[in-house]
């Protein structure tokens, strides 16, 4: 999947700028905050490549800004997000990994 397909999502996030997008136990986050955090995740995942080419990326992150930023970052990098639940038993996590 070409990451440029997510240009509408980036424009939408940018268009709301300083409006609050998410509130979690750690604070309030604007749409701009989410965009910056998501781009950072995408940059780290890509490691110089231009696209993850729909590689599956498993992540285990508690609900909140990190969860949303991670999922968006995976999508921005051209990956398929595979979220795992914190409540999953170890055997189930092993199965997915």
Image (spheres, rainbow, N blue to C red):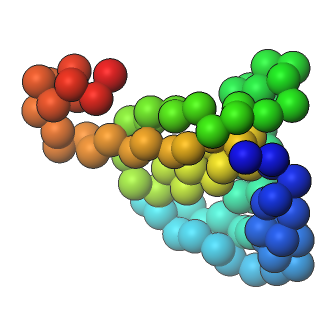
Is residue 4 placed above or below 57 in the rendered structure?
below
User: Quick one: 34 or 46, which is closer to the camera?
Assistant: 46
What residue sits 44% from the left and 33% below the top?
58
**Residue 14 percent across, percent down from the top left:** 87, 70
Q: Quadrant of residue 46?
A: top right
**Residue 85 percent across, percent down from the top left:** 27, 45
- How many numbered callouts? 0
Query: Is 54 placed left or right of 46 in the picture?
Result: left
**Residue 17 percent across, percent down from the top left:** 85, 74
Q: Quadrant of residue 53?
A: top right
Is residue 4 placed above or below 39 in the rendered structure?
below
What residue sits 86% from the left and 31% below the top?
50
Q: Quadrant of the C terminus?
A: top left
What residue sits 87% from the left and 20% below the top?
48
Query: Is 58 placed left or right of 7 in the picture?
Result: left
**Residue 37 percent across, percent down from the top left:** 73, 47
Is residue 30 placed above or below 88 in the rendered structure?
below
Residue 88 visible to the viewer:
yes
Residue 17 visible to the viewer:
no
């Amino acid at each position: 999947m070409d990451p440029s397909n997510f240009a509408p999502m980036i424009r939408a996030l940018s268009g709301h700028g300083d409006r609050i997008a998410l509130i979690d136990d750690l604070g309030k986050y604007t749409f701009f905050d989410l965009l910056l955090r998501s781009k950072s995740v995408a940059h780290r995942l890509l490691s110089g490549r231009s696209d993850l080419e729909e590689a599956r990326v498993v992540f285990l992150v508690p609900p909140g800004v990190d969860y949303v930023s991670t999922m968006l970052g995976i999508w921005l990098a051209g990956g398929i997000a595979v979220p795992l639940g914190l409540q999953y038993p170890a055997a189930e996590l092993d199965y997915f990994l």
